[in-house]
Image (cartoon, coloured by chain):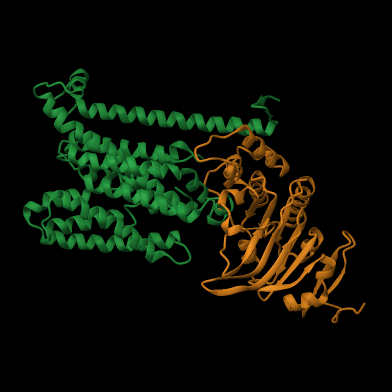
Amino acid sequence: MTVEHTLTAQNLTLGYNKRAVVNELDLDILPGKITAIVGANACGKSTLLRALSRLLMPLSGRVVLDGKDVHRMPAKQLARILGLLPQSPIAPEGITVSDLVGRGRHPHQRLFSRWSAEDAAAVAAALDMTATGDLADRAVDELSGGQRQRVWIAMALAQRTDLLLLDEPTTFLDVSHQVEILDLLVELNQTRGTTIIMVLHDLNLAARYCDQLVAIAAGGIYAAGDPAAVLTEQSIKSVFGLDSQVIVDPVSGKPLMLPIGRRRVIVREPEKR
Amino acid sequence: MTTLTGVSLTATAQTILSGKKRRVRRRRLVIASLIALMTAIFCVSLMCGHTFYTPEEVWRVVLGENIPGASFTVGTLRLPRAALALLVGLSFGFAGVAFQTMLRNPLASPDIIGISSGATAAAVFAIVALSLGATAVSIFAVAAGLGVALLVYLLSYKNGAASARLILIGIGIASMLNSVTSYLLTQASEWDLQEVMRWMTGSLNGTVWKTVLPVLGSQLVFVPLLLSQSKNLSMTQLGDDTAAALGVRVNRTRLIVTLASVGLIAFAAAASGPIAFVAFLSGPIAARIVGAGGSLFLPSALMGALLVLTADFSGQFLLGVRYPVGVITGILGAPYLVWLIVRTNRRGGFL
């Protein structure tokens, strides 16, 4: 287990051009656990993730890591503790997988320092963990979507941070790759004790894979806590404006949400249980 | 399993290290070859011309001996000229690739986005309308180059400077400034035209040591500044968010790189005029030779020096008629620009 870090959002108001997207939000991230953030489109969940990783300066309030305001910490020092994989990172044309993953070592390197054996070992471990070791000398442009996403996660792993934030790490992946990525994150959490915070679109996968589920609606937290307590028919109605039936997932024992739209349903009203 | 400084390495780590070594070897080979070629052309341009001098005579002149004929031709005419060609080539190469990398677009070189056009228009204005002397014209041009860079940046700034908008605004301002230059040309007197031409196409004719020194001085300041940002700059290629998450202060990096590049380009343009397409060509050519990965600063700067030295030498002696260096680089550059645009549209590539 690594050192446990505390990350909290205190009275956070976030926005662009003075227009607030998130209002006076308080959130405690559970150290050493997996937190999933869900919510409707444009509810401010990506904005929250950007603020937590200090990419966005809050309009008011603060993000506190181990008692210190993240916006007052030296950039590289923070990058050794907290990593972020944004939604659409850019791979420079022609870059090889090992070079790209090696970029994750940046916060551990000095201005003109050369590559150390420690860097090589961290990159190798990241490649092995994401099963991309045999791609090391391939160009990132040539890879499939699933392979590319694993490479990006490998880059974030090479950063060796105790907290890892991911913005929709499974978007554009087919279902088997989605499960593979999420399994990988759970393994990372269990073997290294990495605290994981991710924005996910798929409610059922979020409920299955997280320890703490945070539902965001209208720029604030609608509910946060154990997935079984947060993912309810009532909360889905409030957060997404959608009727649904929530059952126990026979595979994982976690809640499973079944949407009730206007067409192609045989049960109109949520069953009263 | 072998060990390196105490850390045991897995098979994957070995693969990574050997791949890394291979790329470093290739890079070193390319840099060494560029330096060798550059030195060779530098020496040839000191020896050859209307009169040929042996390497021994050239060397003695360089050491300060007085040899009738050679001392004037080599020491006063050829040496400062070749030195300036080398230095401005380095400056254009550094600044061009810095802009192209920072804005993630090969079209973003200073000669496309208006910085060189600004310097030219200001210089022509200073010569034609204000009748200023050479030093004042240079200062005017440097200031205008900086001013245009600032203007383009401010006009394109909206939640952070976006690369595509910056390039389009730069191209717009460049064509506006070019028409100012064209208008001023119609007003220019016969004896101003020679000087004006130097500012339009770039030329190394009549170079004296006094014009070489400011360029060298600007490099002593700006090149270390630029190189200090080399790693940070290559991180910004991953996108601003990814770079920031990896501990790069993106805005500070941009500011330093912009300042240093504009400084280099403005001083170089003040000495030789904006030699067409050198800033634009050096980076992409260097990128093709070195391959992806490491920093392009040094390979691109060397490529720039090689281009200017070669173009100036061929412009003087190989074609029968003497052409200013900028005409030669322009003839080389335009087809390359077209090819690059065709290729970029097809593949959506970078550099």
Residue nearest the observer in this picture, B152 or A260? B152
Asked if B314 appears above or below A12 in the picture, the reply is above
Q: Residue at x 24, y 42 (%)?
A: B214
- Image check: B177 left or right of B98? left
User: Residue A38 location, x and y as percent?
Assistant: 72, 67
- Image check: B160 left or right of A65? left
User: Residue B172 location, x and y as percent?
Assistant: 32, 63
Q: Residue at x 39, y 52 (%)?
A: B258
- Image check: B114 left or right of B134? right
- What is the residue that sits farthest to the right in this orientation? A273
Q: Is residue B104 visible?
A: no
Residue nearest the observer in this picture, A156 or B199? A156
Instruction: State the green chain.
Output: B
Instruction: State the orange chain.
Output: A
Quadrant of res A203: bottom right
Q: Residue at x 57, y 60 (%)?
A: A55
Residue nearest the observer in this picture, B311 or A222? A222
Residue nearest the observer in this picture, B304 or A21? A21
